[in-house]
Amino acid sequence: MIDLYTAPTPNGWKASITLEELELPYEVHAVNLTANEQKEPAFLKINPNGRIPAIVDRDEGNLPIFESGAIMIHLAEKAGRLLPTAAGPRARVISWLMFQMGGVGPMMGQANVFYRYFPEKLQPAIDRYQNESRRLFEVLESRLAESEWLADDFSLADIANWSWVRTHKWSGVSIEGLPNLERWLDQMRARPACQRGVEVPVRIPDLSDDTKGAEEFAKNARTMLQR
């Protein structure tokens, strides 16, 4: 059994979708980020960095694991799926997983901060992170023009990147002119495990439009900028 400590964010979805795809039993513990629960002593014992997601693997003597990529790799190795064991295929999956962790996630995250959350509109910063996010989308487009999935087969790499790219409208980043990326987004969206995973721990409002729910989400996110 896995204890999943999470909140409705792209990094959180990476863990929950992986658990759903692998069909591993897990118990959800929702972490209220606006109440700063991720900084409480009990949570810091699991993740000293005070961020979600984190897991505790009860089957491994209550082993705590933090950082979304590390969680995904641990779960895939535990289940024997979504991460090949052969050197070449494994390297391809991990390469695209790290592409998300080192590029897509940080750039889209900063685009969110300056485009949606920061009290002042600093256009050079907005342009910087939106343009870099778009460049990374174009890298994904090039790969997906030659392959159905980011690695040889459906894998952790697809889950990690989709969890972020699916929120591109919230980041203010267009996917116009990227037909293969759009095809892949639709394929991922159609997967039942992906549909279930993005509703863990709760379903959030549609963030693609400036709705009342989206504004409330942004307001809550602003309170966490300095945490």
Image: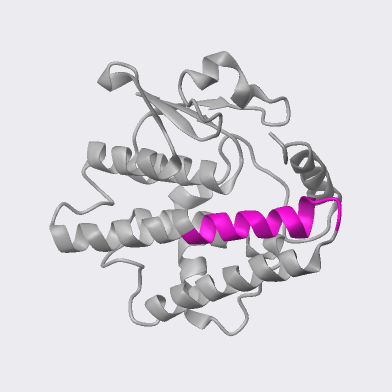
The residue drawn where x is 44% and y is 42% is: 68
Image location of residue 42, percent across then percent down: 53, 14
110 falls in the magenta region: yes
Which quadrant of the rendered structure holds the C terminus?
A: top right
Which quadrant of the rendered structure holds the N terminus?
A: top left
Q: Is residue 12 left or right of residue 153?
A: right
Report the magenta residues as a range: 103-120
Image location of residue 216, percent across then percent down: 82, 43
Q: Is residue 34 left or right of residue 88?
A: right
The part of the image, by quadrant, that contains residue 152 is bottom left
226 w.r.t. 185: above or below: above
The part of the image, by quadrant, that contains residue 76 is top left
Does the rendering let one see residue 191? no
Does the rendering let one see residue 30? yes
Please tell me whether the stretch drawn in magenta is mainly helix, strand or loop: helix
The residue drawn where x is 85% and y is 50% is: 119
Q: Is residue 124 left or right of residue 133?
A: right
